[in-house]
Image: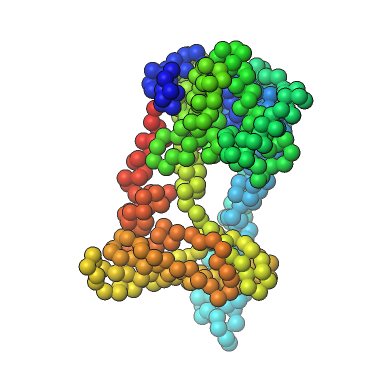
Amino acid sequence: MSVYDKYILTEKREDLLWDKAIFVFDTSALLNFYDFNDEAKNALCKILEILKERIWIPAQVFCEYQKGREKVINKPITDSNKYGSTSFKPSNTINDFKEFIEKNKNNEHHPYFDNEELNRLQELFMNMEPLLNKAQKLIDCQYAKRKNEILELLEIDIIKNEIEKLYIGDELSSEEMLSLVKEGEVRYRNSIPPGYKDKKNKVGTQIYGDLIIWMQILKFAQVKEKNIIFICDDVKQDWYEEAQRKMLQPRHELLHEFYSYTKNDIWFYPFEKFLYHFKQKCETKSLIAYIPTLERIVSYLQTQTRTKYLLQHFHNQIALKCHRCGEEFEALTEDFCFEWIDEYEGEGRMGAMYYHSATEIVTCPKCQQDIFLNLNIWEYPQGIYTNQVITSDDADILGEIDLRYFVKSGDYKCCVRCGRRAMLDEEGLCEYCADELDYEINKE
């Protein structure tokens, strides 16, 4: 393999890897199995069964999996966006309706209804209340059923049973761990991957978790003289190259280190890429029944990948420091209305000039002070945003958002990827970028 070949995944190289390489899963990829329903879990476990003789799990991955398993299983219950609570509660609707009627009963002052219309409203509510109560019971029943299924998984876990059948590597000795920590300190000071991104968020030897996994992979590949396909769903800068318009690629430093150390070959795949290629390259009779389920999983994960991409390249919060109490906090744009006032400011050499302004109100979480934000952005020529200013008399602006992505002018908005003004899809992408991103995600 030439000095450059190791950085390029050709079709021939990829086919050779899939024919002979050992599959190594990282912790995030294994824990991903728990995100799905029982049908999908069975399909994913079938993959482990089919590849059983070609899978190796680093000891560090297995250790992290055991530590994180229970938390991940319980996450749908504890997550307020899933079964932890629901934003739609029919019982709340009933109470709100009752309060509204009571509030508008007295026709001696505002607000009030005509008596006849108020009676009609009460009659409508009386017809609605039994239906809303039925809806509440249905929601509670389904949520309780899902929670019980989740809790049962702690005791009867088909994923854990399947993983424990796999070939699991040996732990590092105390001497090896001390040596690795010393090497890790040097690597992290110089931002040498992998794992240096974890030094701010973890403590103790946990800081070196990714590096331990990497060193165990290097040792295994060298001793066993094996090529590796590494399924790594920890898609961050110390594993993958930062690529906005390119196919996701492993860090070149890691490809170089692996080849120098082992003289063997390696490539990385995020979990959804691995499933996509597995479905294409490893179709067997025993897998045929699971193909429709795997296709749905891949489709779901591709959507998740697009969402993660947008979040990584698109800031959606303003950092503020309250003048009254000094509290620092973040205001999410999802809570903003963005009711823009558009003003035409005349014509320049390159076309029309526009000024867009909006006012948002957020509340300090500590002192409950209302904080007014003034959002201002200038557009010249049409479709090109030249300047923006965010101000507040109630707080210091510690971190801004890019207002281009929130300006609404008719049906045209600014694409979150390329910045063009166009009709956008649900994820904020113009037709061009949506097609391009789909191509990148599915590119072989």
Identify which residue is drawn at 58% across, 31% down.
29
Location of the C terminus by quadrant is: top left
Task: Give 283 or 264, whichever is nearer the viewer.
Answer: 264
- 94 with respect to 302 (left or right): right
Image position, residue 371 (x, y; %): 58, 72
Indicate whether 189 appears above or below 63. Answer: below
- 70 with respect to 392 (left or right): right
Task: Give 94 or 419, whichever is nearer the viewer.
Answer: 419
Location of the N terminus by quadrant is: top left
Image position, residue 368 (x, y; %): 66, 70
Identify which residue is drawn at 30% across, 73% down.
344
Image position, residue 327 (x, y; %): 66, 66
Identify which residue is drawn at 40% across, 32% down.
442
Report which quarter residue 243 is drawn in: top left
- Whether residue 134 is visible, yes or no, is no
Image position, residue 2 (x, y; %): 42, 20
Identify which residue is drawn at 48% across, 68% down.
390
Indicate whether 320 appears above or below 152. Answer: below
Task: Indicate the colouring scheme.
Answer: rainbow
Name the outermost residue toward the right. Answer: 174
- Whether residue 389 is visible, yes or no, is yes
Report which quarter residue 246 is drawn in: top left
